[in-house]
Image (cartoon, rainbow, N blue to C red):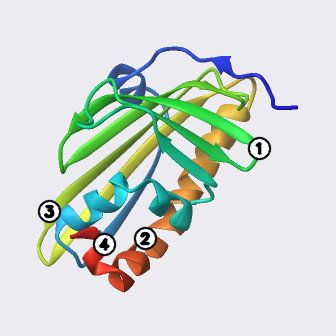
Amino acid sequence: MAKPLKVHKSVGEEYLATAKQGSAVHRYPFPPEMVWNALLDAETWTLWLPITKVIWTSPKPWGPGTTRTVEIGQQKVEETFFAWEEGRRMAFRFERSTLPVSAAVEDYRVVPVEGGCEMRWSGKASAPLFLGGLITAQLTKGLVQGQPKLEELIAANPDKYK
């Protein structure tokens, strides 16, 4: 039987700007649009992070208010994007999930740099007791370990992400 989804606090920029958060930066030897296109591809998320399924639940064009459902094994997260700058930034909150959090956000920024781009990620989760810090640390670890995998995927399939 599937776990019931819990509604989380509706947070956004102000939540991300306060208190401790995780962060991860990775430099890619590709133009920013290739990394951005990888972020738009649902299947690609399952190849570089410990995610088993991604479903965009809003029609294109995507922007603020876009929704998406993500599955991580038996866990399920319904996300709502509160920030979207096409080709540059996407940020979302966990709207509802089976995770033991009261609020969570993730912010992905693709920034041009000489010779390619950087993906700059930050995220934060709040939960009872010490769980918020633990979940934030797990999110951060996933991004730190996952970004080199994403670089390999893009390098192996450049036409897919042009």
- Residue nearer the viewer, 80 or 17: 80
Is 148 situated above or below 102? below
Whole-number angstrom distance, CA of label 1 to CA of label 3: 36 Å
Whole-number angstrom distance, CA of label 2 to CA of label 1: 23 Å
10 Å neighbourhood of mark 2: few (<14), some, or many (≥20)?
Answer: many
Whole-number angstrom distance, CA of label 1 to CA of label 4: 29 Å
Q: Earlier in the sequence, mark 4 or mark 2?
A: 2
- Viewer-nearest of discs 1 and 3: 1
Q: Pointers 1 and 4 in contact (CB under 8 A)?
A: no
Q: Earlier in the sequence, mark 3 or mark 4?
A: 3
Disc 1 designates what residue? 74
Percent of width and height locating residue 71: 64, 44
Q: Give amino acid for label 1.
A: Gln
Disc 4 designates what residue? 160
Is residue 54 left or right of 59 when viewed as pictured?
right
- Residue nearer the viewer, 52 or 152: 52
Whole-number angstrom distance, CA of label 4 to CA of label 2: 13 Å
10 Å neighbourhood of mark 1: few (<14), some, or many (≥20)?
Answer: few
Residue drawn at (46%, 63%) of the image: 44
- Viewer-nearest of discs 2 and 1: 1
Q: Give amino acid for label 4.
A: Lys
Q: Give amino acid for label 3.
A: Pro
Residue drawn at (42%, 77%) of the image: 153
Percent of width and height locating residue 66: 35, 29
Residue 150 — which label?
Answer: 2
